[in-house]
Structure formats: C-alpha cells, structure tokens
Image (tube, rainbow, N blue to C red):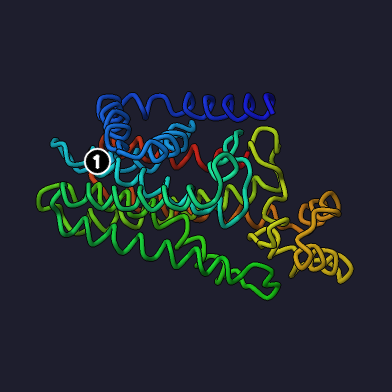
Amino acid sequence: MKSAISSSVSRSAGEISALAPVYSLVQEDFSAVNTLIPNKLTSVVGLVEEIGSYIVESGGKRLRPLMVLLAAGALGYRGEKHISVAAIIEFLHTATLLHDDVVDHSGMRRGRLTANEKWGNAPSVLVGDFLYSRAFQLMVEVGSMDIMEVLARATNTIAEGEVLQLTNVGNLAITEAQYREVIRCKTALLFEAAAHTGALVVDQPESHDVEALRQFGQHFGITYQLVDDWLDYAGDSRLLGKNVGDDLAEGKLTLPLIYALQNSPATDQQMIADAIREKSTTHLTEIVAIVQSSGALDYTHQAAVTESQAALAELDKLRQNQHVDAMRTVTQYSTARLF
C-alpha cells in the first residue's frame, strides 16, 4: 500500500513540477481557489466535511480549475468571479469522482483508498450530492445566467454520459463513434465547461473568442481521456496509481480494446470477448499483448495527437498572450505523456 501511495504522489508531484511555469503564472488566483474550496466545504454535518475534504485534498493537479483561470486570463479578465467559477468546476469534478467510484466499485484512486471503500457507498453518494448542490449555490453567488446555463447543461450531460457508459458495459459491438460520445459527455465536457465559463466571466467577450475557448476545452478533454486510454495498456501501473486492466475487469471497452477487437485474429478476438463478458483479468497479460500487437496503441496515439492539434488550432485563433501560451503548454504536456 505504501509503495502505491508513494508512486502516485511522486507522479502527481512530477506532473505539477513539469507545469510549474503555468501554475506560477496564475499563482495568486490558484491560491485563492485553494483557499475558497475548503471554506465552501463547511457543513453542520461532520461526515460531509470529512469525506469532502478527503476527496478534494487527494493530490490532483486541478487542471479543470486551472483552465478556468487561464481562459479568463487569456481574454484579459481582471476581476474575481473566475475564482468562484474555478471552485465550482472543482466541486462538480469531485462529485463525479465520488459517484464514479461507487458505480465502478473502485477501491483505489490516486494511490489511496476511495471514499466509498473507506466510508461506504451511501455516504459517498450523498456527499457527492452535497458537492453538486454546493456548486449550484456558488453559481447563484456568481450571478451570471450565461455561466449557470453552461454549467447546468454540462452537469446534466455528464450524468447522461455516466448512464451511457453504464449501458455500454460489456457491449462488444460498441463503435469508436459511440465510445467518443461517451468520453465527450463524461470527460471532455467538464474541460469544455471550464474553458467556456472562464471566457464568460469577461464583460461582453467577443463571441468568436468564447467559441474558440469552448472548442479548445472539448478537444483538450478528449485528448486527455485518449491519452489515459493509451496509458492503461502502454504505461506503468505502479506510476499510474491504478492497475492496468481496471477497465477490462469492469467490462468496459476503451479505444485500444475496441480497435484490437476489430483488428485481431479470431482467436484473439474471442479471448477479449470472453474477458469482457466475464469481467475477468485472468488473461490480462495475453490481452495486453494482443492490444499492443494489433496496432491499437499506435491508432489511439494518433487519435490523441489529432485531438491535441485541433485544440492547439483553436488557441491560434485568440490574441496571443502569456495565458494562451500557458494553455498551449498544458496541451503539449498532456500529449507528451504519450512518449
């Protein structure tokens, strides 16, 4: 257990170190977000604060709140609304993590016990609900109907994405297009909402700038998930803080497995199909080898790079400044994990 925690913490620290210039650019704002988050976690129910703090302070990079700050800075915003919006995004993200871990029966996240493993499913779901409702209280305080509309729609679509993913568990016929819709709803949309709302805090922003940042967030989010998919089969599970093949054990098909299932010999396809149906990792080593030999990793790699290039192309539409450069750096860093 200690080695897993150490590996996860080391990886997270290494990633934050690699992005140090980006965090430095928004250091004051980022500190304000980190101060606001625990202040808004207060509750008369002790367990709410305990679980909320446990998951919020679990050592993530907070890339989504970071995107809010960078998007606002990219359009020259100098107020304080973006601090609250960044905290809202983090609360929404944290709520989805709590619910995800319950649905997936996950026992570990970022190298330590999940909240549901530590306190049980019911408290985790209810604290996730608390975080959603606290996020909407903060939206009211921000006082922007445009921002509330974006975040309400995003929250609704993310929930639909969760259900869509659940309905596709064990679905051997899932297509790449269907899978991309799942990750657009489940992962990319919150990155999209972060960049979008970061732009909307600006008074009377140019519509083309808002759209460029929205599109950037979507492409970045898809990139981020595709890179994670690739790492599941090409990365080091000790550094990832989770076991390679977790998705296999849950009966989920990600892009590498979808590609391998469609582009491997019949006997290999049968082994994958049996593992998905049985939610078994008995033949994990063989299946990883099948994925690697099928060309699935190269295909997923290229898909991630293509999305990354689309994200960078949206940034090229903006007036160039330090914050836009920082968003470019984060995007390039994300794809650098492929190499």
Q: Residue furthest left?
A: 204
Eyeballing the image, is 160 above or below 91?
A: below
Camera-side residue of 86 and 18: 86
**Which residue is under mark 1?**
74
Camera-side residue of 48 and 109: 48
Q: Quadrant of the image for the C terminus?
A: top right
What is the quadrant of residue 69 in the picture? top left
Residue 174, position as x, y percentages in the image: 64, 73
For image coordinates 32% across by 54% down, the residue present is 193
Amino acid on which disc 1 is placed: Ala
Camera-side residue of 316 and 95: 95
Residue 191, position as x, y percentages in the image: 39, 50
Q: Residue furthest front?
A: 45
Eyeballing the image, is 253 above or below 76?
A: below
- Whether residue 62 is visible to the viewer of this picture, yes or no, is no
For image coordinates 71% across by 72% down, the residue present is 172
- Whether residue 129 is visible to the viewer of this picture, yes or no, is yes
Camera-side residue of 37 and 27: 37
Q: Please state if 335 lies on the left or on the right of 19 as rendered.
A: right
For image coordinates 31% across by 49% down, the residue present is 195
User: Badge 1 local density, few (<14 within 10 Å), some, or many (20+)?
Assistant: many
Q: Residue furthest right?
A: 267
Secondary structure type for disc 1: helix
Residue 203, position as x, y percentages in the image: 10, 49
Q: Quadrant of the image for the N terminus?
A: top right
Residue 36, position as x, y percentages in the image: 26, 33
For image coordinates 40% across by 58% down, the residue present is 189
